[in-house]
Image (cartoon, grey):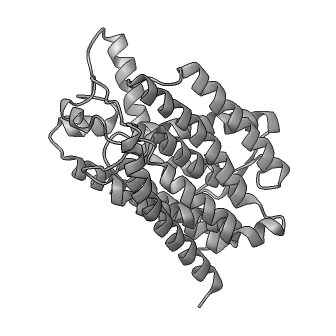
Amino acid sequence: MDPTIVTMAAAAAVSFILTVVIGRLLIPALRALHAGQSIKEIGPTWHMSKQGTPTMGGLMFIAAIGVVTVAMGWGHIAEGDRGGLYVFLFALVFGAIGFIDDYMKVVHHENTGLTAGWKFLLQLSAAILMTVLLRHEGYLSPNLYVPFLDWIVPLPWPVYMVFAAFVMVGTVNAVNITDGVDGLSSSVTLPVALFFVIITAHWGQLELNVVASALLGGLLGFLGYNHSPAKGFMGDTGSLFLGGMVCALAFATDMPLILVFVGIVYIAETLSDIIQIGYFKLTHGKRIFKMAPLHHHFEMSGWRERKVVAVFAAVSAIFCALALLGVWQRYHI
């Protein structure tokens, strides 16, 4: 059997098992600490029944992915191939920002944590640091790869840096917005993780393949606790970490524009929020959607949570498959 397949299967399996085991300890501990989620009163009324569900559950898959990334990727790290480690550390920084936000919400028993200004400043700093690091380590070039067209568009480094920071911060927050229904963000991100597992394996970037496979296994393990009705939420700790992982993998494979396809659900969710707010202000109170972001609109239209998750995950899977077609000329898939 191909050693690459064995490694990716092992990384996913170990991450899955670790997530499940850690979750069995973490969920009761969060309950004991009264680390419950505060539900926004402006959301769907039936979401109020979720009040008090343990949050910060993302810690279970963050820990599992970290262990697998270091333990199973140690050989690559020792040889100087630290791409997988950098991807994890980048995501971990965003997870830490989310943890601070969650912790403040739990302490104050309300759904407000870090101010928008502080969040943006911390996220922007992390994005700039990651871009500089990946460039220094040779994972990034200022030549922007365009999927489907198989074009390379050269950009000046300063322009690329601004572009990268914008995309990174935007992607991370888009994943965070998607985390509004039991199992939604993790289900939508599963096909994205699989996309990067396939790409990194085929391209021979085994150090990145380990962390992508660990992400896949970790999300599968977390869904056991997060599917409707959720026993625990990932919180901003988990959603910002996931956004960081997806974004870092796209940049580490030097194809950030692929996020337009693999991240189509994140983009739709974010645009629905922007459109709703903009239209509301322009028309002095009128709305396009019954409620934003988009998953709430479908809930208000009568869809059950599980249907929203299934449809959104299916859309994500279809666009991830299209993304594979979009890069086949580059990777000769």
Give the residue at x 24% y 50%. 229
**Looking at the image, is 274 positioned above or below residue 181?**
above
Answer with the quarter of the image where residue 280 lies: top left
The front one of 192 and 114 is 114
Q: Residue furthest front?
A: 32
Give the residue at x 27% y 28%. 43
Answer with the quarter of the image where residue 181 lies: top left
Is residue 164 in view from this perspective? Answer: yes
**Looking at the image, is 81 positioned above or below residue 142?**
below
Give the residue at x 73% y 59%. 83
Is residue 255 in view from this perspective? Answer: no
Count the numbered circles shown: 0
Quarter of the image with the C terminus is bottom right
Q: Residue furthest left?
A: 302
Q: Position of residue 24 (x, y in %)?
A: 40, 59
Give the residue at x 26% y 15%. 286
Q: Position of residue 93 (x, y in %)?
A: 64, 41
The front one of 242 and 97 is 97
Q: Residue furthest bottom?
A: 1
Residue 322 appears left or right of 210: left
Q: Position of residue 92 (x, y in %)?
A: 62, 46
Quarter of the image with the N terminus is bottom right
Q: Position of residue 6 (x, y in %)?
A: 58, 82
**Looking at the image, is 97 positioned above or below residue 278?**
below
